[in-house]
Structure formats: structure tokens, C-alpha cells
Image: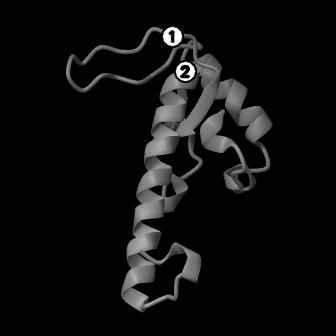
């Protein structure tokens, strides 16, 4: 998945993830739990990924009630969105602290 390519986020997963992931997929019937905000309809695609509803970066837990099955598309969308938000926060923080940028990146 592109959102995980080169990422170290997998290291944040609990040691028993190999047990947790299949349990959550089975609990959710191997069906994506994403619900469209505009229609309120649930995605009907086959789920193969398990994701944190509230991510670790926002103090989300590894408890079953914070985990949901997602299809590849929606997992990628959610992970990409969360990564973009985290990147923006880091950039703004660097600007506030006056962190020096590489001369090749200056405007």
C-alpha cells in the first residue's frame, strides 16, 4: 500500500497484531466499515486491512472498540489523510521554531 510504503508505522503495532487483525476482520464480516458522510451508506467492498479509528498520534488505543476493518482503498485514503495532517503539523512547528531549511529548498 502506498500509504505504508517506506513507513515505520508498522513498528507501532502491538506484538499480538497477528492475532488481533484476523479477529477484527472476522468480527466485521470481512466488510469495509467506512461510511460515506454524504449518504450514510457503508462501503460494500471486501476488507483486508484493520485500522485504528482514532490513531495512535491522537492517543487512540489498540482496544478492539478502536479498530475497524477497511478495504484497501479506504485504508489508503485514511492513512494518506492522517499522514498529510501530521506532515503539515510538523512543517508548521518547524516554521515556528525557526528551524533552518536546506539551502536548496529555500524559495
Asked whether, in this view, residue 96 is left or right of residue 12, the answer is: left
Mark 1 vs 2, N-terminal side: 1
> Do we see residue 54 in this rendering?
no
Asked whether, in this view, residue 59 is left or right of residue 10, the answer is: left
Tell which residue pokes out farthest to the left in this image. Answer: 38
**Viewport quadrant of the N terminus:** top right
Q: Which mark is residue 77?
A: none
Please tell me which residue lies in front, 9 or 93. Answer: 93
Asked whether, in this view, residue 19 is left or right of residue 37, the answer is: right
Secondary element at tag 2? loop
Please tell me which residue lies in front, 72 or 107. Answer: 107
- 10 Å crowding of disc 1: few (<14), some (14-19), many (20+): some
Q: Which mark is residue 71?
A: 2
Question: Which percent across, then down, holds residue 48?
Answer: 64, 21
Q: How many marks?
A: 2
- Which residue, given by chain and number where applicable, does mark 1 sit on? 45
Picture residue at 79% right of the left edge, 35% below the top: 18
- 10 Å crowding of disc 2: few (<14), some (14-19), many (20+): many
Q: Is residue 102 above or below residue 19?
A: below
**Viewport quadrant of the C terminus:** bottom left
Q: Is residue 39 above or below residue 78?
A: above
Asked whether, in this view, residue 24 is left or right of residue 74, the answer is: right
Please tell me which residue lies in front, 73 or 71. Answer: 73
Secondary element at tag 1? loop
Which color scheme is applied?
one colour
Question: Which percent across, then down, holds residue 75?
Answer: 53, 31
Question: Which percent across, then down, holds residue 12?
Answer: 69, 56
Q: Are marks 1 and 2 in contact (CB under 8 Å)?
A: yes
Q: CA distance from mark 1 to mark 2?
A: 6 Å
Amino acid at each position: 500500500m502506498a500509504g505504508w510504503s517506506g513507513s515505520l508505522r508498522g513498528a507501532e503495532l502491538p506484538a499480538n497484531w497477528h492475532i488481533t487483525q484476523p479477529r477484527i476482520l472476522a468480527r466485521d464480516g470481512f466488510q469495509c466499515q467506512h461510511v460515506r458522510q454524504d449518504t450514510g451508506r457503508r462501503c460494500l467492498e471486501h476488507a483486508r486491512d484493520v485500522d485504528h479509528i482514532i490513531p495512535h498520534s491522537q492517543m487512540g488505543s489498540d482496544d478492539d472498540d478502536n479498530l475497524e476493518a477497511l478495504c484497501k482503498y479506504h485504508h489508503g485514503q485514511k492513512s494518506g489523510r492522517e499522514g498529510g495532517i501530521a506532515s503539515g503539523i510538523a512543517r508548521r512547528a518547524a516554521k515556528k521554531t525557526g528551524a533552518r531549511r536546506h539551502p536548496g529548498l529555500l524559495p
